[in-house]
Image (cartoon, rainbow, N blue to C red):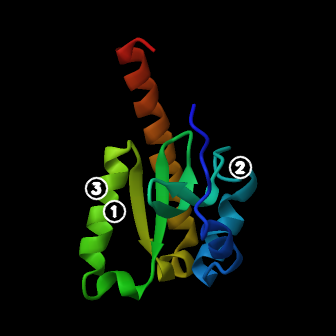
Amino acid sequence: MPIRRPHPNAKALRKRMPPAERALWRALRNRQLGGFRFRRQHTVGPFIADFACVEARLIIELDGDQHGRDNGPARDASRDAFLGSEGWRVVRFWNDETFKNMDGVLETILHEAQLRVAELKRRRETDGR
């Protein structure tokens, strides 16, 4: 198995997380959400995901308003396509959703993680692994 080297910026990004990411991290850390382990600023290929649950192959991205401007949507679509090709499911929320509806955000994340784990289990059984 290849050694996974952290992206050089990942540690710096963890230290200066925006308020929305800090709020979500407080709810995700220490397996608080359904027993799922989330990592923050997780490297996948050339990208750093805001949050990742490796067990569920699930990435959570929190988007600020820059994601809705200029070529932000196209960049996000390209990034999501790459991550999807690597077997990851990407779920995006706007930053303000974490403040306005944290319970709904967490409910969606938990639902997606449970679906992904079940889906991955079915695939392994079908593939005979």
User: Nearer the viewer's eye, disc 3 or disc 2?
Assistant: 3
Q: CA distance from mark 3 to mark 1?
A: 5 Å
Amino acid type, callout 1:
Arg
Q: Is residue 111 left or right of residue 4?
A: left
Q: Earlier in the sequence, mark 2 or mark 1?
A: 2
x 29%, y 72%: residue: 75
Q: Residues within 10 Å of mark 1 (few under 14, many from 20)?
A: some
Residue 6 image point, x, y percent: 62, 57
Q: Which residue is mark 3?
A: 81
x 50%, y 46%: residue: 113
Q: Residues within 10 Å of mark 3 (few under 14, many from 20)?
A: some
**Image quarter of the C terminus:** top left
Q: Residues within 10 Å of mark 2 (few under 14, many from 20)?
A: few
x 58%, y 62%: residue: 7
Q: Secondary structure at mark 1?
A: helix
Q: Secondary structure at mark 2?
A: helix
Answer whether labels 2 and 1 touch (C-beta < 8 Å): no
> Height in image: 103 above or below 44?
below
Q: Earlier in the sequence, mark 3 or mark 2?
A: 2
Amino acid type, callout 2:
Arg
Q: CA distance from mark 2 to mark 1?
A: 27 Å
Answer whether labels 3 and 1 touch (C-beta < 8 Å): yes
Amino acid type, callout 3:
Ala
The image's mark for residue 79 is 1
Answer whether labels 3 and 2 touch (C-beta < 8 Å): no
> Height in image: 58 above or below 67?
above
Q: Secondary structure at mark 3?
A: helix
